[in-house]
Amino acid sequence: MKISVREAGDAKIVDVEGDVDLGSSPELRKALFGALQEVRKLALNLSQIRYIDSSGIATLVEVLKDSQRMKKDFVLFGLNPAVERVFKLTHVIRIFRVFASEQEAMESA
Amino acid sequence: MTSAQPVFHFKVVMPSDPRYLPVVRGVVCPLAAAIGWDEADCGAITLALDEALTNVIRHAYHGRADGVIELECKQSGDELEVTLWDQGEPPDMSKICALERGCLEPGGLGTHIIKDVMDTVSYQALPRGNRFLGVKRLRKTI
């Protein structure tokens, strides 16, 4: 799994590539919690994720909870069909703000 | 002389180390495709097995990487039977599918996925060890 972080004004965009599973989700968790501290808005680009399991989904739920506690914005974009199926299987898709593109995610209030 | 149609059947012994999860996914997904499931179902079956292995690593072995997991995948007619054996802590039946889905709780999603994807699921603590058994049937549309 590869993780990189870009700045976009007062927001940050985290790009993730590869598989998110029990072995790699702690690294994603660390990157997301680190980035969340420094910004008003955090966007996660899921378009290059080939696979995500429930430990990855649980990580995103944890970040969402923390963002709400800190009154910050955490959004997702670029879900491919395989990743979207996992979100639907776990019934968590409705608790996230999900956008089709980076532009839509960054323009969202 | 006639003989029964040979079926795909493999057994592997692996450490309870998450590094090997992608290896298993790389075998099971093409196996499901070869039996006849479509891409979406292959992904779901692979995810369900990955979740079962993850549960063994996290809950039976408490994250230790030196436990032993025996994995067996067997095609039986139009079914895929997946069995896991481990020697860790027995499963706590009260925690299986205990949390409601779609809530803001990060844990407990894996057992729901397994139950939704597989047709039959069982968790047993036996003298030989803990056994997970999941069976998925191929539904023919023709």
Image: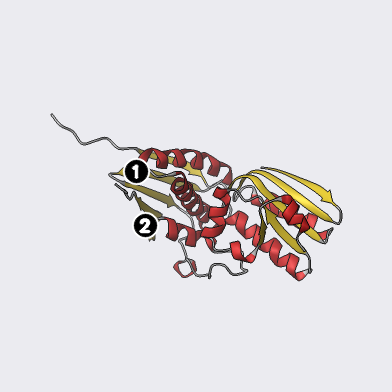
Tell me the element at label 2: loop
| Vertical relation: B39 (above or below) B109 | above
Q: Which residue is mark 1?
A: B74
Q: Is residue B9 visible?
A: yes
Q: Nearer the viewer, mark 2 or mark 1?
A: 2
Question: In the picture, residue A10 is in which quadrant?
Answer: bottom right
Residue drawn at x 59%, y 61% is A93
Horizontal side of residue A65 vs B85, given as left or right: right
Mark 1, Cα crowd under 10 Å, few <14 / some 14-19 / many 20+, is: some
Q: CA distance from mark 2 to mark 1?
A: 15 Å
* Observer-nearest of A68 and B98: A68
Residue drawn at x 20%, y 36% is B4
The subunit carrying tag 1 is B
* Observer-nearest of B27 and B123: B27
* Furthest residue toward left: B1
The subunit carrying tag 2 is B
Q: Which residue is mark 2?
A: B119
Q: Amino acid at mark 1?
A: Lys
Horizontal side of residue B67 vs A67, given as left or right: left
Q: Position of residue A86 (x, y in %)?
A: 54, 54
Q: Amino acid at mark 2?
A: Asp
